[in-house]
Image (cartoon, rainbow, N blue to C red):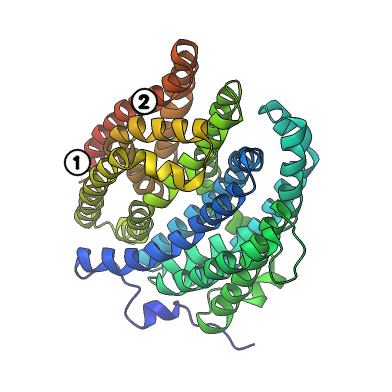
């Protein structure tokens, strides 16, 4: 194999240097492709939820039980993705191009190992884990159909996340987005065929949903690895065989990945606790919460896209000690987040009940889903500030700040609040607690982030 260039191809083409040029142009160039790429990733869950809702409330509730678990592994691996983006972007920003390929290669090897171990542990703990969450024996039978296959293919879900982060760090957001869009389209087309047994296929229900999800992500993984190796030279077989500096690569990645991963895991862990509380009310409340979580993930794709797009810009400029440019991109991202959150909140409050009916005909499921959309969206404009600042802190190489912010919100504030809320008003109290905590913690983290940037300048 020929020796790789010292700088990723995107940077050699003049597209990877984010320390110069117009901030708005860079932000939109990196964010717009991610709008479709993240939408593709989120659509896997949303599409599966829609089709499985046609199987009945118990199947939908079972799918809702799986969400905190799959989301936990997803968020652990997202920590590695954040680390990959942060480390590679700051290397490029400081001119340290030689190690980008080595760290990218070793990061992919590391995440393959970590995701395999986590999937094995999840498989072994499946019964006690979901029982503790409140799943009934009927729900467990559905859950096993989905999770056994999903755990077997966890590596296929994990590797593309880290590889795509390497593309973005070098200034290319288009390639990973196109790959994930194609995978999502394939999932949307094939899922109903396998779930319902169309065109002569056997009816596989939740097993079919898991099989299609793993297969689509596996194809995306292979295509992504091909582009990383053959076209962009961001990974190399040489570094797979030569592990002399594997320890150094792991140290660089894990320094960000561990706190970022732990921070990300807090969200599904607390989600599992809320699911446990709602299970006391019934499967309908659990199903409604699962619907709401997936709808939220979908409607905030633009905010997520801007956050992902800003990360390499913040990282490169932080590495180049250009603090003014860091402040400018953070300002633009926050402005967009506020405007989008206000618009979404207005739409959800107006369309709460019709939207709930898209996913279920069960009167209680519709009631609880509508209740969520009437209460929680009022907090979006404040709650989303925390996620934006978390992205900024990670890109700056300060993951401990992102951890403190989210730990304070979810563990110190939200768990006691939803517990008290459920005791006082059951499902309504839980939703009110989620909204109130989002407002308070979002404003607090925003105030600190502003203070930090002023101090750094």
Mark number displayed over residue 454: 1
Res. 245 in view: no
Rendered view: 408 above or below 107: above
Disc 2: CA contacts within 10 A as few (<14), some (14-19) or many (>=20): many
Residue at point 33%, 52% (across, down):
303
Residue at point 50%, 44% (across, down):
260
Res. 20 in view: yes
Residue topped by disc 2: 437
Alpha carbon of mark 2 to alpha carbon of mark 1: how far? 26 Å
- Please indicate whether residue 361 sits to the left or right of residue 110 in the image: left
Residue at point 46%, 48% (across, down):
358
Question: Disc 2, disc 1: CB below 8 Å?
Answer: no
Rendered view: 128 above or below 117: above
Rendered view: 191 above or below 8: above
Indicate which label's residue lies in the foreground, 2 or 1.
2
**Quadrant location of the N terminus in the rendered image:** bottom right
Q: Position of residue 106 (x, y in %)?
A: 62, 63
Q: Quadrant of residue 155?
A: bottom right
Q: Position of residue 8 (x, y in %)?
A: 45, 77
SS class of the residue under badge 1?
helix
Q: Quadrant of residue 275?
A: top right
Residue at point 56%, 73% (across, down):
224
SS class of the residue under badge 2?
helix
């Amino acid at each position: 194999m020929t020796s790789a260039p010292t700088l990723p191809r995107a940077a050699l083409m003049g597209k990877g240097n984010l320390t110069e040029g117009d901030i708005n142009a860079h932000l939109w160039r990196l964010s717009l492709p991610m709008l479709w790429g993240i939408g593709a990733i989120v659509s896997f869950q949303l599409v599966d939820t829609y089709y499985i809702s046609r199987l009945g409330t118990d199947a939908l509730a079972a799918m809702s039980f799986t969400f905190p678990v799959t989301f936990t592994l997803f968020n652990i691996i997202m920590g590695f993705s954040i680390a990959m983006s942060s480390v590679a972007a700051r290397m490029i920003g400081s001119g340290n191009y030689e190690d980008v390929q080595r760290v990218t290669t070793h990061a992919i090897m590391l995440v393959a190992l970590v995701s395999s171990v986590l999937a094995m542990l999840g498989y072994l703990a499946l019964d006690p884990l979901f029982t503790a969450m409140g799943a009934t024996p009927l729900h467990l039978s559905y859950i096993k159909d989905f999770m056994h296959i999903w755990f077997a293919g966890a590596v296929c879900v994990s590797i593309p996340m880290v590889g795509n982060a390497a593309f973005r760090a070098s200034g290319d957001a288009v390639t990973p987005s196109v790959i994930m869009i194609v995978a999502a389209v394939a999932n949307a087309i094939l899922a109903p065929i396998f779930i319902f047994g169309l065109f002569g296929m056997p009816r596989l229900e939740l097993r079919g949903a898991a099989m299609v999800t793993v297969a689509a992500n596996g194809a995306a993984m292979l295509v992504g690895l091909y582009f990383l190796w053959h076209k962009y030279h961001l990974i190399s077989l040489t570094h797979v065989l030569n592990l002399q500096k594997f320890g150094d690569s792991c140290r660089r990645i894990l320094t960000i990945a561990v706190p970022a991963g732990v921070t990300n895991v807090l969200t599904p862990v607390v989600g599992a606790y809320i699911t446990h509380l709602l299970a006391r009310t019934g499967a309908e409340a659990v199903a409604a919460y699962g619907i709401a979580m997936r709808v939220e993930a979908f409607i905030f794709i633009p905010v997520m896209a801007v956050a992902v797009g800003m990360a390499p810009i913040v990282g490169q400029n932080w590495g180049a000690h250009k603090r003014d440019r860091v402040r400018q991109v953070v300002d633009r991202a926050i402005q967009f987040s506020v405007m989008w959150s206000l618009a979404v909140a207005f739409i959800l409050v107006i369309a709460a009940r019709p939207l709930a009916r898209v996913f279920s005909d069960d009167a209680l499921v519709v009631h609880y889903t509508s209740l969520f959309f009437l209460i929680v969206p009022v907090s979006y404009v404040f709650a989303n500030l925390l996620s934006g600042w978390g992205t900024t802190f990670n890109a700056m190489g300060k993951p401990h700040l992102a951890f403190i912010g989210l730990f304070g919100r979810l563990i110190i504030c939200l768990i006691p609040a939803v517990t008290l809320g459920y005791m006082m008003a059951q499902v309504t109290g839980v939703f009110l607690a989620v909204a109130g905590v989002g407002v308070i913690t979002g404003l607090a983290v925003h105030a600190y982030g502003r203070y930090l940037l002023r101090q750094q300048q």
